[in-house]
């Protein structure tokens, strides 16, 4: 990267299934205050703001109208990215890399609990002419993909159930994960079939929370306490069309990761990256993404729980409990992963702390029915 | 600090029509393809794709950017959709600018599309949901309200007669007669505009841009790549954007401070000290007739309350000293929201290269400015483009 | 190059094309429903409306009282200092006379939306509402108006607890 960019502050509210006590503006205001305090900045110094949001998740058209006030961003450069928060972070980092900006704030939030008809909203993302008229609950798309992935990689339903049980169990140790629970793989396998092979316990539940991330150029960041440096980042979209996509592999993650690894100078991700916070929706996505990230060869991610996990990947991948444990938060989903990685790199994760974590990777998927993914690699030293 | 130079090297556009047979994907594809072909650029050589499109409610597709990614050349590429409401069409090239200026990408195709006609019975319906869900939506507002409220405030503060505002409709719709994309080119008089149906006083039908379907696109390249593609690149020499508070009922609407701040940001980057002398052609955002005037003032190209005067004097005519909306603007060419802003970027590209045919301005322009605006009278986006050298 | 007269992609359709089924189309009525949390500031504001009061918040650093209220001051970025009960009168900052509905149907009786600067709030701080009991031609900027409330029993904590504003 031709200009170093660092995260110098993150603020958040604790993810919860419901948050009637605060409006989205008030929730974001709390996260912003926390982020600015950590970064020791005033919003007046910030040169540009980015919000990751989608209109129909907010229930408001042209949602960027409502983004500036709660960030202290009145009459400032501000724009929205209709993408995951990690894409928002990349958008901000690219602005800094131009040399025209030194200090940028990224925000993402979820008020998923306020969407009364979430499945209908999701259905609205399908092609209106050839897919929507079939009138099937759109989560079937995850069923199609899980089936194709399992067949292609010779992964069993048990392997996927292991991921779900493992992540939910670990989430129980994470104060930021509302869905933690000691659950056995057996219980996953016996949970209600919904979109086979997807079962009830494969489904991520939603949370509400807000995240505010402060990014700075090297000039500013080197004066701050414990900046976390971005050493690689990329994003990619594969086919949005159901009829023409590759169902077996997350090619977008693969392409994005290749570029990010190249920037960060990483050749062997499993060995060189200490902690991974990646998308694990429906359980199988964690395995599929680990392979796309080249942590495992194709079809080998299921071995993560085998005896002789010498590289201890089962503890280094999603120590937070993943999206299954923390909750699906639409555009804010990836920002929570960034928060977990940054906390790990600062040694602040208590029981879930990965010892001597120096390099971390956060990866997000935009969720059904998309193929878009984003990757960011963070280091606690430049 | 010296910034990496970014050029526009190609442009493409579709016709703007009230209701297109082509789907959103097809419109995006045609604009993208035309832009790529105009500079003989194969898609394989495009490193990144930016898409600009306004509310999902128009096309009736959630996560519309994802849906349109392939049709904009985004398959298996870094694809980003950025969004600032009506300001999107001029923001998307700013997004593309920073992708290339960052040094991470050498090329970017920027595509803007809107298919408003999918929203039935009228695209206005989608605008109901832009208002605050607690304090405003229960009142049943429509989009005309806010324009009428702003226009009235602007007129009354400066004591501007409506006839002077009507002149903008006459000029832009006449200019549009020469634009091959145009939906509403027409030869009209001030009386025609004044006597057309009052929709929301003080706004009459002929002071309003139409709802439209359409798409437009440009290809951006770094200096090194641009010089290989064309002898005639048009540089993006300054960009600016600015968003004001959402509490719009707490602001004085007579003047767009946020447009001024966006303009100052762009002028500073472009090294422009005296915009009235240095900007040779301008494409301000004109969804309503008064908006062109309001924006010329916000852009510091006219004194407050004086834009109607320079319009009456012919300074902003196509053969004037500072032609404004030589394309025909949104009033004449049409207003497929994001694509309309991008149409202005395309127009500057053609004007600065001397390729605008009958629309060509007469002052052999070196520097041009495009601007868009949106949200709750709240966001300004500005791009300054410069010919050669 | 974009010369006048060049042929571009984009095919304009007419109503006739749909009636005669020359072109196909599909339809969908979205079922998009939301229940937005009002949180602290809006929650309090709506409670005030139910009681027949207009509430604002005050920032002592910026020395301004704003409405609609928020718990934070967006300019100096700190918590607001106190709640202030405002009057239910104000002046017209700007207005329109709207002759069409949101889907462009003609209205027989035009609506008069206005920004009303509320008495007791800082200068220029207003809310969006409607004017009535007035001849549209008589509405002026700076005109004094007063809220007309729904009867107490019908108020439910909504901006519609004020039916409209009328001149005084």
Image (cartoon, rainbow, N blue to C red):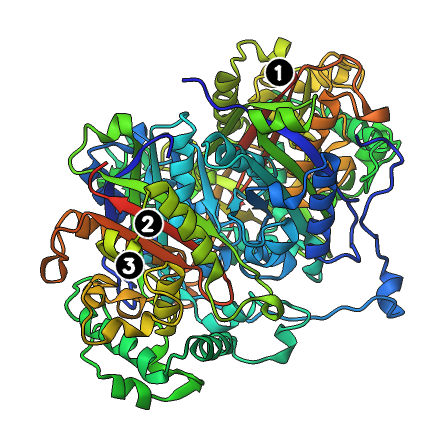
Mark 1 or 2: in front is: 2
- The residue identified by callout 3 is A277
Separation (CA) of disc 2 from disc 3: 19 Å
Q: Is residue C35 left or right of residue A33?
A: right
Q: Dividing the image into 4 quarters, which one contains the N terminus of chain A?
A: top left
Tell which circle, 2 or 3, labels the residue nearer the N-terminal end: 2
- The residue lying at 60 percent from left, 61 percent from top is B61
Q: Quadrant of residue A294?
A: bottom left
- The residue lying at 20 percent from left, 42 percent from top is A380
The chain ID associated with circle 3 is A
| Residue in the foreground of this view, choosing between C48 and C75 | C75
Residue A292: horizontal and vertical position, in percent?
40, 61
Separation (CA) of disc 1 from disc 2: 58 Å
Mark 2 or 3: in front is: 2
Q: Is residue B3 left or right of residue C96?
A: left
The chain ID associated with circle 2 is A
| Residue in the foreground of this view, choosing between C65 and A75 | A75
- The residue identified by callout 2 is A267
Residue A101: horizontal and vertical position, in percent?
38, 28
Q: Residues within 10 Å of mark 3 (few under 14, many from 20)?
A: many
Can the viewer see residue C40? no
| Residue in the foreground of this view, choosing between B314 and B109 | B109
- The residue identified by callout 1 is B302
Q: Judge if badges 2 and 3 mark residues of a common chain.
A: yes
Discs 1, 3 touching: Cβ within 8 Å: no
Q: Residues within 10 Å of mark 1 (few under 14, many from 20)?
A: many
Separation (CA) of disc 1 from disc 3: 53 Å
Look at the numbered disc 1 and give the secondary structure of its residue.
loop
Q: Dividing the image into 4 quarters, which one contains the C terminus of chain A?
A: top left
Residue B35: horizontal and vertical position, in percent?
71, 39
Look at the numbered disc 2 and give the secondary structure of its residue.
loop
């Amino acid at each position: 990267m031709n200009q170093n960019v660092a995260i110098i502050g993150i603020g958040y509210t604790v993810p919860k299934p419901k948050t009637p006590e605060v409006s989205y503006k008030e929730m974001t205001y709390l996260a912003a205050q926390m982020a600015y305090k950590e970064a020791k900045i005033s919003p007046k110094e910030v040169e540009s703001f980015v919000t990751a949001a989608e209109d129909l998740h907010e229930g408001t058209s042209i949602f960027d109208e409502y983004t500036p006030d709660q960030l202290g961003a009145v009459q400032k450069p501000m724009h929205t990215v209709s993408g995951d928060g990690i894409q928002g972070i990349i958008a901000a980092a690219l602005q800094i890399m131009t040399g025209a900006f030194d200090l940028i704030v990224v925000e993402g939030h979820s008020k998923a609990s306020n969407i009364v008809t979430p499945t209908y909203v999701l259905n609205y993302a399908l092609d209106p002419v050839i897919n929507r008229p079939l009138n099937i609950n759109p989560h079937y798309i995850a069923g199609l993909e899980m089936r194709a992935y399992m067949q292609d990689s010779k992964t069993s339903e048990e392997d996927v159930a292991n991921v779900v049980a493992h992540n939910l169990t670990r989430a129980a140790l994470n104060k930021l994960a509302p869905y933690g629970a000691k659950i056995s793989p057996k219980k996953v396998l016996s949970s209600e079939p919904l979109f086979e092979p997807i079962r009830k316990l494969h489904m991520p539940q939603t949370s509400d929370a807000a995240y505010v991330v402060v990014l700075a150029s090297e000039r500013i960041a080197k004066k701050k306490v414990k900046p976390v440096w971005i050493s690689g980042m990329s994003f990619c979209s594969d086919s949005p069309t159901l009829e023409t996509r590759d169902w077996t592999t997350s090619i977008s993650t693969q392409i994005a990761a290749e570029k990010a690894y190249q920037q960060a100078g990483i050749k062997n991700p499993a060995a060189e990256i200490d902690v991974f916070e990646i998308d694990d929706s429906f359980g199988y996505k964690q395995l599929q993404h680990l392979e796309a990230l080249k942590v495992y060869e194709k079809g080998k991610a299921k071995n993560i729980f085998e005896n002789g996990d010498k590289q201890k990947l089962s503890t280094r991948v999603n120590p937070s409990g993943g999206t299954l444990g923390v909750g699906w938060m639409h555009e804010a989903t990836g920002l929570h992963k960034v928060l977990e990685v940054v906390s790990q790199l600062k040694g602040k994760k208590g029981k879930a702390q990965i010892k001597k974590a120096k390099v971390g990777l956060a990866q997000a998927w935009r969720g059904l029915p998309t193929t878009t993914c984003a990757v960011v690699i963070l280091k606690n030293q430049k | 600090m010296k910034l990496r130079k970014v050029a526009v090297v190609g442009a493409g556009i579709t016709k703007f029509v009230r209701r297109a047979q082509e789907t959103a994907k097809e419109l995006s594809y045609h604009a993208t393809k035309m832009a790529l072909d105009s500079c003989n650029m194969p898609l394989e050589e495009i490193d990144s794709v930016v898409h600009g499109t306004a509310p999902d409610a128009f096309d009736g597709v959630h996560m519309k950017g994802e849906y349109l990614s392939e049709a904009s050349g985004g398959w298996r590429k870094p694809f980003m959709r950025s969004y600032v409401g009506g300001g999107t069409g001029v923001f998307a090239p700013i997004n593309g600018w920073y992708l290339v200026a960052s040094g991470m990408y050498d090329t970017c195709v920027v595509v803007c599309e809107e298919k408003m006609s999918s929203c039935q019975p009228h695209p206005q319906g989608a605008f109901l949901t832009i208002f605050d869900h607690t304090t405003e939506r229960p009142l049943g507002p429509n989009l005309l309200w806010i324009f009428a409220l702003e226009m009235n405030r602007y007129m009354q503060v400066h004591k501007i007669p409506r006839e002077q505002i009507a002149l903008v409709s006459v000029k832009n719709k006449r200019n549009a007669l020469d634009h091959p994309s145009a939906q509403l080119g027409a030869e009209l008089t001030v009386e025609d505009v004044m006597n057309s149906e009052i929709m929301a006083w003080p706004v009459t039908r002929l002071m309003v841009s139409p709802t439209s379907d359409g798409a437009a696109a440009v290809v951006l390249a770094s200096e090194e790549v641009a010089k290989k593609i064309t002898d005639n690149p048009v540089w993006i020499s300054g960009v600016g954007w600015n968003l004001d508070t959402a509490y719009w009922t707490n602001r004085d609407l007579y003047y767009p401070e946020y447009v001024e701040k966006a303009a100052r940001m762009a002028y500073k980057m472009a090294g422009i000290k005296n915009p009235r002398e240095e900007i040779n052609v301008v494409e301000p955002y004109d969804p309503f007739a008064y908006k062109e005037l309001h924006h010329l003032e916000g852009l510091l190209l006219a004194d407050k309350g004086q834009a109607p005067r320079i319009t009456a004097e012919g300074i902003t005519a196509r053969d004037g000293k500072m032609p404004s909306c030589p394309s025909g603007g949104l009033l004449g060419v049409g207003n497929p929201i994001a694509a309309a802003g991008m149409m202005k970027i395309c127009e500057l590209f053609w004007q600065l290269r001397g390729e605008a045919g009958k629309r060509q301005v007469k002052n052999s322009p070196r520097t041009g400015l495009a601007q868009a605006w949106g949200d709750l009278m709240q966001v300004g986006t500005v791009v300054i483009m410069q010919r050669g050298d | 190059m974009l010369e006048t007269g060049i042929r571009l992609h984009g095919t304009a359709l007419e109503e006739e094309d749909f009636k005669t089924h020359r072109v196909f189309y599909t339809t969908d009525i979205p079922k998009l429903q939301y229940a937005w949390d009002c949180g602290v500031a809006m929650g309090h504001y709506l409670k005030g409306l139910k009681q027949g009061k207009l509430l604002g918040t005050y920032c002592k650093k910026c020395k301004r009282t704003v409405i609609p209220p928020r718990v934070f001051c967006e300019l100096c970025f700190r918590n607001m200092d106190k709640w202030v009960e405002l009057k239910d009168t104000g002046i017209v900052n700007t207005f329109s006379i709207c002759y069409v509905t949101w889907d462009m149907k003609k209205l027989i009786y035009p609506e008069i939306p206005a920004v009303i600067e509320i008495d007791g709030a800082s200068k220029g701080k207003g809310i969006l509402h409607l004017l009535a009991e007035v001849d549209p031609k008589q509405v002026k900027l700076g005109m004094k108006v007063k809220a007309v409330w729904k009867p107490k029993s019908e108020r439910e904590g909504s901006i519609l607890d004020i039916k409209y504003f009328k001149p005084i």
